C-alpha cells in the first residue's frame, strides 16, 4: 500500500511533467515550451553552469561514481 | 540584473543544500562534487572577480566526443574507476562550454516564459521533496523497497546492458542538446 502511494507520487510527477511539456507545445503563448525556456536560461552563465552540473551529476551518480553509497 | 542575482542566489543555495545533504548521508566524493559546484556558481556569480571568459567548444567536436563517450560508457563497468575517469574527463569539455561570458543579447522575459519557469520550478522542487521524503523514510524504516528513491528504482534498470545503453544514450542526447542550446545563445 505504502509502496503504491510513493510510486504514485513519482508517476504523478512524471505525468505533470509530460502534461506541461505537451500543453506548452500546443499553447506556446500561454506556457513557453521547455526548449524556449532552456534557451532563455542558458544565456546566463550561472544558469548554464547549474544546468550542466545537474546533467553531469546524474550521469556521475548512476554510472561514474566509483564508490556509491 | 537584480533578477540574475536572485537566480544566482537560488542556485547557490540549492547546491549548498545538496552539499550539506551529501555530507550528512556520508558520501565524501559527492560532498566534494557538490562543494566544487557550489564554489563554481559562487565564483561565476561574482562578476567583479574577472574569471576567464572561455569560448564555447565547437558543437561538432562536442558531439563527437560525447558519441565516443557513450560507446565507452556502454562497454566499461558502471561504478568502476575507469568509468569515473571518463566522467571526470568530460569536465574540461563541459566547463569550456559553460564558462564563456554571458550573451550581449538583451533578454526580455515574457509572461509565457515566467509561467513555464514557475511550473518547471515547482515540478523540480516537488520531485526533490518526494525523493527526500522517501530517502528519510527508507533510512528510518531500513526499507527502501517500501520507500524507494529514484536511484533505487533506476538501478535495476541500468544493471542490464539494454537498460544501460538506453540510459546512457538518453543522458548523452540531453548533454548534446544542452551543448547545442548553449552554443546558440
Image (spheres, coloured by chain):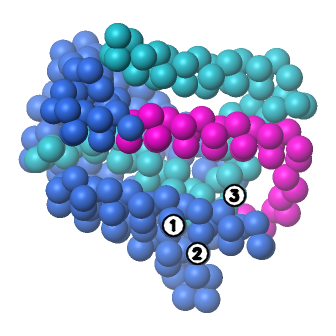
Q: Provide the residue designation for mark 1.
A: B12
Tag 2 secondary structure: helix
Chain painted blue: B
- C-alpha span from label 3 to label 2: 14 Å
User: Disc 1 or 2, which lies upstream in sequence?
Assistant: 1
Tag 3 secondary structure: loop
Q: Quadrant of the C terminus of chain A?
A: top left
Q: Quadrant of the N terminus of chain A?
A: top left
- Name the main secondary structure of what is drawn in magenta: helix
| x then y, percent, for residue A16 | 62, 22
Magenta stretch holds residue B130? yes
Tell me the chain of label 1: B
The answer to the question of whether label 1 and label 2 lie on touching residues, with beta carbons closer than 8 A, is yes
Tell me the chain of label 3: A
Q: Nearer the viewer, mark 3 or mark 2?
A: 2
The residue lying at 43 percent from left, 53 percent from top is A53
The residue lying at 10 percent from left, 41 percent from top is B80
User: For this rendering, which residue is in front, B34 or B83?
Assistant: B34
- When the figure is inspected, residue B151 is found, relative to residue B34, above or below; the finding is above
Q: Provide the residue designation for mark 3.
A: A43
Magenta residues? B103-132
Residue B164 seen by the camera: no
Amino acid at each position: 500500500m505504502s509502496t503504491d502511494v510513493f510510486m504514485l507520487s513519482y508517476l504523478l510527477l512524471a505525468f505533470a511533467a509530460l502534461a506541461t511539456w505537451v500543453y506548452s507545445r500546443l499553447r506556446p503563448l500561454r506556457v513557453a515550451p521547455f526548449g524556449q525556456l532552456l534557451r532563455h536560461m542558458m544565456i546566463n552563465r550561472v544558469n548554464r553552469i547549474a544546468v550542466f552540473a545537474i546533467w553531469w551529476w546524474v550521469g556521475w551518480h548512476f554510472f561514474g561514481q566509483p564508490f556509491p553509497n | 540584473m537584480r533578477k540574475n542575482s536572485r537566480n544566482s542566489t537560488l542556485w547557490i543555495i540549492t547546491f549548498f543544500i545538496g552539499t550539506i545533504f551529501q555530507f550528512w548521508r556520508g558520501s565524501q566524493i559527492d560532498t566534494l562534487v557538490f562543494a566544487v559546484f557550489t564554489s563554481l556558481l559562487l565564483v561565476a556569480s561574482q562578476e567583479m572577480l574577472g574569471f576567464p571568459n572561455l569560448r564555447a567548444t565547437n558543437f561538432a567536436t562536442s558531439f563527437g566526443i560525447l558519441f565516443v563517450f557513450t560507446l565507452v560508457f556502454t562497454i566499461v563497468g558502471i561504478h568502476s574507476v575507469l568509468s569515473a575517469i571518463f566522467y571526470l574527463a568530460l569536465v574540461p569539455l563541459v566547463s569550456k562550454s559553460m564558462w564563456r561570458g554571458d550573451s550581449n543579447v538583451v533578454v526580455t522575459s515574457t509572461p509565457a516564459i515566467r509561467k513555464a519557469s514557475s511550473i518547471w520550478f515547482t515540478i523540480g522542487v516537488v520531485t526533490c521533496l518526494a525523493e527526500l521524503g522517501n530517502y528519510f523514510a527508507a533510512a528510518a524504516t531500513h526499507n527502501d523497497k517500501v520507500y524507494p528513491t529514484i536511484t533505487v528504482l533506476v538501478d535495476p534498470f541500468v544493471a542490464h546492458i539494454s537498460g544501460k545503453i538506453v540510459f546512457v544514450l538518453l543522458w548523452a542526447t540531453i548533454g548534446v542538446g544542452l551543448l547545442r542550446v548553449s552554443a546558440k545563445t
